[in-house]
Image (tube, rainbow, N blue to C red):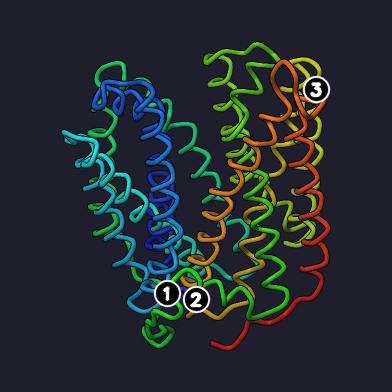
Amino acid sequence: MSAAPPPRRIAAIAFILVTALLDVMSMGIVIPVLPQLIEQLTGSSSEASLWNGLFVALWAAMQFLCSPVIGSLSDRYGRRPVILLSVAGLTLDYLLMALAPTLWWLALGRILAGVTSSSFTSAFAYMADITPPESRARGYGLIGAAFSAGFVAGPLLGGVLGEISLRAPFWAAAGLSGLAFLYGLIVLPESLAPDKRMAFHWTRANPFGALRLLRSHPELSSLAVVNFLLYFAHHLFSAVFVLYAGDRYGWGAWQVGTLLALVGLMDMGVQGVLVGPVVKRLGDRGTMVVGLAFGAVGVAAMGLAPTGWLFVAAMFPNALWGLAMPTIQSLMTQRVSESEQGQLQGANNSVGSIAGIASPLFFGWVYALSAGAHPALPFIGSAFLIAAAVLAGAALLGWAAGRRNTPLTAG
């Protein structure tokens, strides 16, 4: 627990939530305008699609490589300097992309975005530092709500400002990040005491070394697999949702955008409001399993829904999926020492990055087999049913993994 007085602790939590919001906005704000900006710089729509795919891969790859490094640096030097440097780097990234005269400058901006957006590993570690174990699920729920707000606000802001100029969203994001840096410089206290810090070693900071931490305890390994399966299933929506909605229900950009905003708002409500009370009643483990089970039911119902209205109805039980992420994080933080929280979050982010690369490729392939005039798979909702099965498996594994209340490992 931090020794900071309550007002400063509240201000610090507020800053962490703003940082999480901006990290997700760094992904969402470019969605409406980046492909058009690439096309403007290349002069070709076919080349633009190739470059856009490369930029997505660059961002994910930098997340995979840098998240453990940033997490380990925060274990060594404290959370405050790492978070502030990351926010400053995010400001520089937005400025670079706003001014980028060529594709190579834009690529450099995407690389820098992947590095600086890895700061939420330190944000999660900060939350673990300043909250007791029984309150961490609620704290992570608040971060999850901030993520959801970013997924709603980012594309909306990018779309509105993109009507003014393709560069305007980047200028706006740079201004917001700069303000967040100044705010954090004034109000953010350090959360990790010097005697709790761990020496920096590349053997732990590289992504493969960081993943060894997840194998240090049987329950931690199982929870890491649950975390991977959750991320893997979640990327179904980024991979095939737009195509599926158009092919099966005839929805266009307006309907899809509205539904995505609704999903983000429901997720904000679940993670920001429901997590705390449900954890008090069911505990971390029970809440995690309930969230994964509702996710499985909701995703299966989406795949089976014969009409658009039934698909929308399935979104409501599916929203309770948001109970799972903060409780998985909470259970995992209780199984490592204070000096390893940054390394744990870096390893978790690398796991998410692996899922972010593999899942869209897999579900895109499954959807390609199930769509079209002569599909190899007879049912167009096959990808949704597979994702539901993945979540059901995660719920069973999570139930087994969280059974024992294991104390923290030694630091």
Relative to 342, is 117 above or below?
A: above
Relative to 393, is 265 above or below?
A: above
Residue 158 visible? The answer is: no
Q: Quadrant of residue 319?
A: top right
Q: Which mark is residue 209?
A: 2
The earlier-in-sequence mark between 1 and 3 is 1
Q: Position of residue 21 (x, y in %)?
A: 42, 44
Q: Residue at x 73, y 35 (%)?
A: 383
Q: Position of residue 68 (x, y in %)?
A: 44, 68
Q: Position of residue 335 (x, y in %)?
A: 64, 76
How crowded pointer 3 is (Cα within 10 Å; few <14, some 14-19, many 20+) is rated as: some
Q: Residue at x 71, y 30 (%)?
A: 369
Indicate left or right for 309 with 334 as reference.
right
| 1 and 2 marks in contact (CB < 8 Å) | yes
| 3 and 2 marks in contact (CB < 8 Å) | no
| Callout 2 secondary element | helix
Depth check: 354 or 329 in front? 354
What type is the residue that disc 1 sits on?
Ala
Depth check: 278 or 102 in front? 102
Q: Quadrant of residue 191?
A: bottom left
Depth check: 142 or 177 in front? 177
How crowded pointer 2 is (Cα within 10 Å; few <14, some 14-19, many 20+) is rated as: some
Indicate left or right for 241 with 169 as reference.
right
| Callout 1 secondary element | helix
What type is the residue that disc 2 sits on?
Gly
What type is the residue that disc 3 sits on?
Ala
Residue labelled with disc 3: 305
Q: Residue at x 68, y 79 (%)?
A: 217
Residue labelled with disc 1: 205
Q: Nearer the viewer, mark 3 or mark 2?
A: 2
Relative to 94, is 257 above or below?
A: above
